[in-house]
Image (spheres, rainbow, N blue to C red):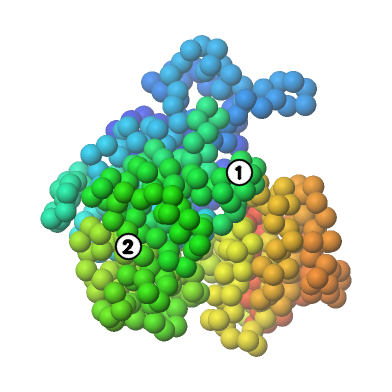
Amino acid sequence: MGGLAALAREAGHNVTGCDAGVYPPMSDQLRALGIELIEGFGADQLALQPDVFVVGNVVSRARLADGSPKFPLMEAILDAGLPYTSGPQWLAEQVLQGRHVLAVAGTHGKTTTTSMLAWILERAGQQPGFLIGGVPLNFGVSARLGATQRPHAGDAPQGRSPLFVIEADEYDTAFFDKRSKFVHYRPRTAVLNNLEFDHADIFDDLAAIERQFHHLVRTVPPSGRVVVNGLEESLTRVLHAGCWSTVSSFGAAVSDFSAQGDPQAFDVLHQGAAVARVQWGLTGVHNQLNALAAIAAAHHVGVPVQQAAQALADFQNVKRRMELRGTVGGIAVYDDFAHHPTALRTTLDGLRRSLGPDARILAVFEPRSNTMKLGAMKSQLPWALEPANLVFCHTAGLDWDATQALAPLGVGPGQRAQTAADIGTLVSQVLQAAQPGDHIVCMSNGGFGGVHERLLRSLSKQ
C-alpha cells in the first residue's frame, strides 16, 4: 500500500494514508515523499474528503471485545456510501492499463526476484515502472511509474508498450474481494517462481493455492509467456490444469534456463549451452534460482542473457534481505525478512555456505506471519533452523508452545535453543551467548521490536 501511495503521488494525486504501527523502511520512504501518514483508523478522517478510498487487505469488518468496530473509518465509508476500491484494482485501472506487465509470483523470493528483474530492465535502458514489496537498494524506492513508452521497442506483440514489473502476491485482495491480488494484474510475462503451502489463515491446503495460481495463468494472453520453475511439482500441476501461452522453464537440468556452478559464481545455460556468467555478492541456491527466473523473464521482452547476467553483477539486493545492519566487536548483525520455514532454512543455508562449517550462526526469529501464529508449520521449525548453531525465539502472541516445537533442538539455558516472551529478555539471551566472530541473523516479517538496533547498541556498550 505504501508503494501504491508513492505511485499515486508520482502520478500527480494528493495522497494521504492511515495505518497502525508502520515501521522502516516504508515509514521512512513515505516521509521522504511527503505523504502524510495518520496513525489509526478513526472515522474523523472522512473530513479529508478524498475522491476515493483505496483499501488495503489489513482492513476488515472485525469487532473488538467491547463490540466496537476495529476499523471505524471503513464503517463510516460504508455508511456514507463513499467511493472505495482495493489496492490491486486501483493499480490495474489507473497504472497497468496499456503496459506490458511482468508479474513475479511465488511463495518465496518474490521481492528479490522482482527487484532483480527491474534492475536487469533498467540496465538494458528500458526504464521500467515497478511495484515491489520492499526497497531494492539499486533504486532506493519500492515503486515508480517508469517510462510512458518503451525506450527500446521489441518486435513481439505490444512491443512498444512500456514495461511494468510487479510483485504478484497470492494473498487475498480485500475484505470485499477474496480473489488473490495477482488476478488483477493481467501480465504478459508471468513468473511462477515456486509454490508451497502458506497463508493458513485463508487457504485450507496447497491445492487451494494451486487453484489461485492457475487463475493467474488463465489471464496470460496467447502471445504472453509463463516462466516456470521446473523443479516444482506443484507448478507442474498448475500448468497441467491448462496453459494457453508459451512456457519457458528454469532450474531443472533439462529446463530452458539452468545454472552450472556455485551460487556466487555460475554459468547460465540456455537450452543446454553456456551463454553467460553471473558473478555477484549474493549467496544461496534460492538466489541462483531467482536469478534464472529474472533472466528468463527479461529474455521474453528482448534482453539478451549476457546483458542480463552483467546487470546482476552489480545487483545490490533488497533492504531486509540478509542486510548487514552493523558489526560491533567482531559480531555481525543481519536483518532478514524470512518467516516461512523454507525461507528460514534457505536463508541460513545460504549464509552457512558462504561462511563455511566453522563459523557460528545465531538465529533470532519470531513466528509473526498469520500462518506461523496459527502454528500450522511449527513442526518444521527444527529442520528450518538446523543450520544455526544457536536459536532464539520470540514467543509473544503465539497460541502454541514454542518450547515444545523446538524441543528436538534442546531448549533452555545452555541448550541450543532458547525462548523469550519479550524483546528485552530475548536480547539479554543473545548477548549472553554471543562471541567475537559470531553472525547474528534476525528474521521476521515485521519490525521485530527494533531488535537489530537494540543488539547493536548493547554490543557497543559491552
Q: Looking at the figure, which quarter contains the C terminus? A: bottom right
Residue 298 point in image, percent of width and height: 28, 61
Amino acid type, callout 1: Phe
Residue 55 point in image, percent of width and height: 49, 30
Amino acid type, callout 2: Ser
Mark 1–mark 2 distance (CA, rounded to whole Å): 28 Å
Along the horizontal axis of the image, is 368 left or right of 269? Answer: right
Residue at mark 2: 248
Q: Residue furthest top?
A: 80
Q: Residue at x 57, y 69 (%)?
A: 347
**Against 279, is 55 above or below?**
above
Graded by Cα atoms within 10 Å as few (under 14), some (14 to 19) or many (20 or more), the crowding at tag 2 reads many
Q: Quadrant of residue 421?
A: bottom right
Along the horizontal axis of the image, is 414 left or right of 301? Answer: right
Residue 110 visible (yes or no): no
**461 or 84, nearer to the observer:** 84
